[in-house]
Image (cartoon, coloured by chain):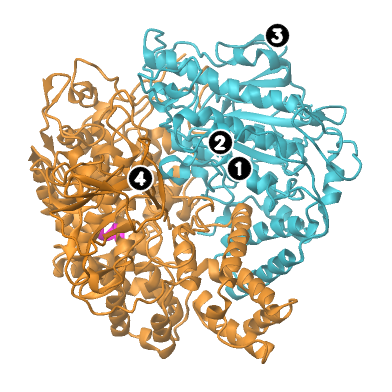
Amino acid sequence: MNDRDLRPSSLLRQRRALERRAAGFGRRRLLQGLGLAAIAGPFLNLALRGRPAAAAAGKAQRVIFFYFPDGVVGQSQDGDPSQWHASGSESDFSLSPILDVLAPRKADCLFFNGLSMGPADSGSHPGGAKKLLTAVDGGFGESIDQVLARTVGADAPYRHLYLGAMANQNNASGDKHISYPSAGVTITPEDDPRKAFELLFGNGGGGGGGGGAPDPTKVTVIDGVLGDMEAMRSQLGDLEKSKLDLHLEALREVEKRIKAGPTGTCDDPAVDLDAIGDDLYDPGHFPAILRAQTDLLVQAMACGLSRVGVLQSSNHTSELIMSRFPGTEMYDPNYDMRSHQASHYGSKHDPQKREYSDYLKQRRWWVEQYLYLLDQLAARPDGDGTMLDSSLVLLCTEVCDGNTHLHDDMPLVLGGRGGGAVSPGRLLSYGGDRHAGLLCAIGQAMGADLQGFGDTNTPALGGVLS
Amino acid sequence: MTVARPLVLPWPRLVGPLLAILLAAPIACGDAEAETDGDGLGVGEGDVARGAALYRELCAACHGLAGEGGLGTPLAGWSRPEDELIHIIDETMPPQNTAVCTGACPADVAAYILGGLGGASCEGEPTSPRQLRLLTRREYNNTVRDLLFPAPLSEGAPCKADAECDLSSESCVADLCAADPCGRHTFVFDPEGASYQSVHVAGSFNNWAGTIAEGGWPLTYDAAAGVYYAKQELAEGSYTYKLVLDESTWITDPQNPNTEPDGFGGENSLLEIACDGGGAGGGPPGFEPASSFPVESRPKGYGYDNNAAAGIVTAVHVEEQLRAAREVATLALENLDALVPCDPAADAEGCARDFVTTFGRRAFRRPLSPAEVDKYAGLVIGEASFDAGVSVALQVMLASPYFLYRSEIGEDAGDGTIALTPYEVASALSYAFWGTMPDDALLDAAESGLLGSAEGIESEARRLLEDPRARALIGVFGSQWLGVEGIAGADKSAVAFPEWEPAIGAAMAEETRLLVEHAIFEGGGFDELLSADYTFVNGPLAAFYGIAGVEGDAFVQAPLPGERAGILGQGALLASFAHSDQSSPVRRGVMVRERLLCQQFGTPPPAAGGVPDVDPNATTRERFRQHSADQSCALCHTFIDELGFGFERFDGIGRYRESENGQAIDASGDLSDVEGMGSGTHAPFGTIPELAAILAGSQAVHTCFSRQVFRFTMGYLETPADLCALQGIDQRFAAAGYDVRELLVAIVTSPNFLRRR
């Protein structure tokens, strides 16, 4: 099966156009274009070159997809009301027992009711994870983060940042990951904040300190590798084309970074790498790992290293023992409560039942981590406002209620103003419209030329974009 | 407002595709109404490729991979109209959860079924895909080791005793001196003419045992060498110890200058073991430059790290590959003479061409084309110094797609089929048997045309099987097949299992690896994997299992207690397929069905229950009873739980127990439907050895094992089109008495291995 055949033809055209004009975007020009020199903050010591230009009006500068596993406390099997969904009118609404965590940022978020991922695989964790960012049944499509990475994000030093916290635990199978560079194929996130740090801010990375000309050896090497890649592609013709196209794009991205030289965008971020401990899969370390990955992603974006990020916490049907998170209200060293275990709280909302009460606490904790991400963005100035003003941050999980696993009324929150593309502080209610329309709107807010998204080719959802 | 409820279904054997059950549409979480039939496709609109993937995931468990039937009706040769089939699928399939196949799915699946389910006749075309296979992290590390840092060839001097070799670094193995693997330390004590009743080692590794009876490691006297010595396997770490003479005089090791204060005014000898499990091989200890590459993606149902379709390169891979190439080049240049066997001062360009021609053939696992020789020689002489040029050429080669992918593309064989080239065959063989690059002999066999015939391939295959690397790769396969790779890092509850420690998990992983290697290479083959009445343990693991008479950290073969047998009795398996704080009949049952019998389950229905709470007053079997009481659960769990309950005498960390919460454990199990779900047989068992015997007597377990090895070898999940070739492989496996080495030979000599579609 040729994966590429399943992509919408408009994307194919767009892709070819981008490939044609791929060369010539120097990194310095990019950084100027992103208007980053004005960034400062408590953790930053920036040494940017070039002058800032005003952010493009009405366009989001960056997007982050923040994923957590195993759904939320939605409407129960027996009909108890959702503990997640907000209620009220578009402008006058109240949050819910879980979303109440976001009260301090209520005015910075768009809340959604009634968005569906469609009926296929409804009732399944993997089925939901496959559709979550692809909006294609079975994951037979490219995910929105990848579309944006190779279109509007392609000029950034890093087209795509995919960081995880225990997302690869137990050799997680492919459907446990949510980013699809081509139909049916997932990639794995980087679970190790130390390695992410090295990639982004170490000597080899784009954020490396110093300044100066490109390393001539690195230039020779990447040119030599690209030469072999071109030769192999012409030998193979259409054989393994999808695989080699992705490889070539990856080489071109790195080539661009190498040839731009170590421009010294910013110094090391103040990320507490010691707090994460030695064992990346010890659940007691999970909060520190997720925090480090969040800080790294925010810092990398503050430095203009990337416009598209995915933060994946654990993975669906998660074995993460959340009762081992130190210092949280879930903490209980005498009892192992896993995420997926808690999600099966039963047919009704029974506060007497431990699964239910822990599940509620767990879901609130996930929203608190999302709130932290929003707060970090809000703490950094960007142009006339903050990074949160110029960003979009989607909170998402693969099913609605963790016990029924249905794919309707999906728990989604969109934070940020997207550079004016979005007017937050509203509750948008729909009648089963596809979430593909929200992904399409996010793409358009990022400046992508998307007319529709997903296997339903759903156009941008009405009411999202200003 | 309607509310989702579990679907109540008649007994699954009644559920055939013609059984039209009207099912309530799935209902939204919250208030939104679900779409019911909004975007379905009609006759002729289905996509066969998507249908194939969906069929495998949603239908094959009951209807068979090739539509041969089982729990569901046979579908091969379906002759009724397409619209009827679409309708049946849309309305009734899969029976426990119709919502998972709506939209385009019914038409896609119908198109696949009516298109012949992807099957091929035995006279048909080759079925394996032409593919590029990205080296996995493990293959990359092995390849770099063999390419640039091969272990110095052992002189292999004949010997009859360790003392005839270099005692401190070699052992006498099979009458030849062989280098000790990292971690094997030799304690040597020269009595300088004195004589002792006993000399032993006591230290932090054996609880400072004051006597040999208490666990001290005895040194034996070798009269020829005139010394006392002992070789001991030690895990990485630092240890303090003393030598004890006649169990009374404690001295520091005269041969070891490193000491540290013992806290009592004296000194202890200090020993550092650092090798990162590197084993034999050159390069710095533990140099595994690919270990920080992104982890491999494993598609659902494919349990191995080497899936070809999932092996794609992202920008993170490229960064890591370039970094690794720099590190490798830096190290390789420390020993440039070994790499460049000519004098650049005499003729730089000639030497550059010699180097890239010779080295390139090994790096790309095929001869370089003239243009490639020009290119790489140009890189060598294009730098300021020859050394710098070699470094650049090395880095380009190691990040080149010709190095990173092994090609299974093939070329037109002239008879209308595509055949792998001899060099591709050489790589396919070496990665299949060794997980690394071909050696010079194999490349020479490709060059000489020896790999052009089945006989030549078979003779090379048998040679490769004799190499220790073949054993090591079987061990890797075993731990991936059984899903026990992560046991050392398992999150076991300190409350439920305070006895658990990572060192026990690591020992269990080693135990499984040793058992798999031994059963396959020295034992009776596959059946012995199931039935072995022995295992391999070190002191701590033996104590954990209650096996007497094993001490120290070295692994030795030991008889198993009667309640255990073979792989099913392995702590690694029992603890991996359990929860952090309790056992898991469900995981264990699914493990046997999926990994040993290749019986797959579909997606659990909505509102499937979670793991029942630990209940201090109930046994696990009692807690899971709801599965069989609720018919929608029973649809699948009848095949899972009754089997999994048979493991209940083993707790969540693999220890034997006879009671749980004060109640006697009922560990009776039933391996029903062993030859295929729906076959309707029952096979009750009371112990793990009995279960192992039932499995060993089944056809399905052998067929499944050959599928598993086929997947690991070929890099993809078999399709119906492979079933014909697999029949031939199965026959050879059976004819060889289920000798796994013969199975490997059968796979690599089958047409599917050599030809491509």
Q: Nearer the viewer, residue A43 or A69?
A: A43
* Subunit that carries the residue with mark 4: B
Instruction: Name the residue that disc number 4 marks.
Output: B268
Label 3: chain letter: A
- Disc 4 is placed on an element classified as strand
Measured along the vertical axis of the image, is residue B116 above or below residue B447?
above
Q: CA distance from mark 1 to mark 4?
A: 49 Å
Q: Nearer the viewer, residue B111 or A236?
A: A236
Say which chain is orange.
B
Task: Please report the bounds of the magenta region as a residue range.
Answer: B704-709
Kindly identify the amino acid type of the residue bearing the numbered disc 1. Tyr
Q: Which residue is mark 1?
A: A162
Examine the structure image and report whether residue B706 is included in the region drawn in magenta: yes
The residue to which callout 3 is attached is A92
Closest to the camera, between mark 1 and mark 3, is 1
Residue B32 painted magenta: no
Q: CA distance from mark 2 to mark 4?
A: 49 Å
Cβ–Cβ under 8 Å for marks 1 and 2? yes
Q: Identify the mark at residue B731; answer none if there is no mark.
A: none
Determine the chain carrying the residue at label 2.
A
Residue placed at 39% from the left, 85% from the top? B445
Please name which of the two marks, 1 or 4, marks the residue nearer to the observer: 4
Cα–Cα span, label 3 and label 2: 32 Å
Question: Residue A73, image x and y in percent?
Answer: 48, 18
Q: In the image, is residue A282 above or below residue B151? A: above
Q: Nearer the viewer, mark 3 or mark 2?
A: 2
Q: Is residue B704 visible?
A: no
**In the structure shown, which secondary structural element does the residue marked by tag 2 occupy?**
strand
Q: Residues within 10 Å of mark 2 (few under 14, many from 20)?
A: many
What crowding class fits label 1: few (fewer than 14 Cα within 10 Å), some (14-19), or many (20 or more)? Answer: many
